[in-house]
Amino acid sequence: MTLPPIGRSAAYLGLFLLGAVVGVAGGLLQAAWFPGGLLLSLLAAAGLFLGGSRATGGRAGAVAPAAGWMVSVILLTSTRPEGDFMFGAGVGSYLFLLGGMAVAVMCATLGQVRQPTVPDARLGK
C-alpha cells in the first residue's frame, strides 16, 4: 500500500471539510424548517457523498465527506458548559442523525470502485 498522490489527498481533505460544512448547515436547516429542511439537508448530504465518490472515482470519495459530516454533527450534539445544545430531543433531530448515517453508508456502498489499469485484465468479458 502506498500513500495517495498529493492532489488526491488534497481532494479528500477538501471533501472532508465540505462534509463538515454540510453537516453544520444541515443541522441548522433541519431544525428551522422541519419537513422541507430535513429533506433538503439529507439530499444535500447525499449529493455530496455520491458526488465525492464520482469525482474521485472510488469509495473513499464518499467516505471522506461522510466522516466530516459525522464529526461536525457529533460535535453539535454535545452540550456546552452553559447547558446549551444544538439538537433538541425531537423526531427531526433523530431523523437527521440516523438518516444522514444511512445515506452515508448507502453512498459509500454504491460508490464506484476503480478498475485496474493493467491492459491484460479481463474486465467486462
Image (cartoon, rainbow, N blue to C red):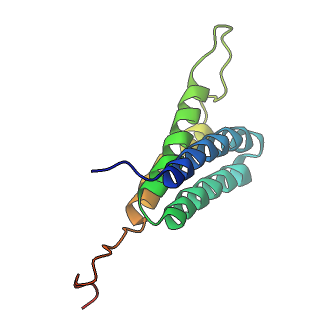
Q: Residue at x 70, y 51 (%)?
A: 35
- Residue 5 picture location, percent across and down: 45, 53
Relative to the observer, which residue lies in front, 72 or 100?
A: 72
Q: How many numbered badges does the structure rendering display?
A: 0
98 displayed left or right of 30: left
| In the image, farthest residue toward the right | 32
Relative to the observer, which residue lies in front, 88 or 24?
A: 24
- Residue 98 picture location, percent across and down: 49, 44
21 displayed left or right of 49: right
Q: Residue at x 42, y 63 (%)?
A: 58
* Image height of 89 relative to 56, above or below: above
* Image height of 5 relative to 78, above or below: below
Residue 99: tell me if it is visible: no
Q: Residue at x 66, y 51 (%)?
A: 41
| In the image, farthest residue toward the top | 81
- Residue 78 picture location, percent across and down: 56, 21
* Image height of 26 relative to 113, above or below: above
**In which quadrant of the rendered view does residue 52 lie?**
bottom right
- Residue 60 picture location, percent across and down: 43, 54
Residue 34: tell me if it is visible: yes
Image quadrant holding the C terminus, namely: bottom left
Relative to the observer, which residue lies in front, 102 or 58?
A: 58
Q: Residue at x 57, y 49 (%)?
A: 15
**In which quadrant of the rendered view does residue 83 lie?**
top right
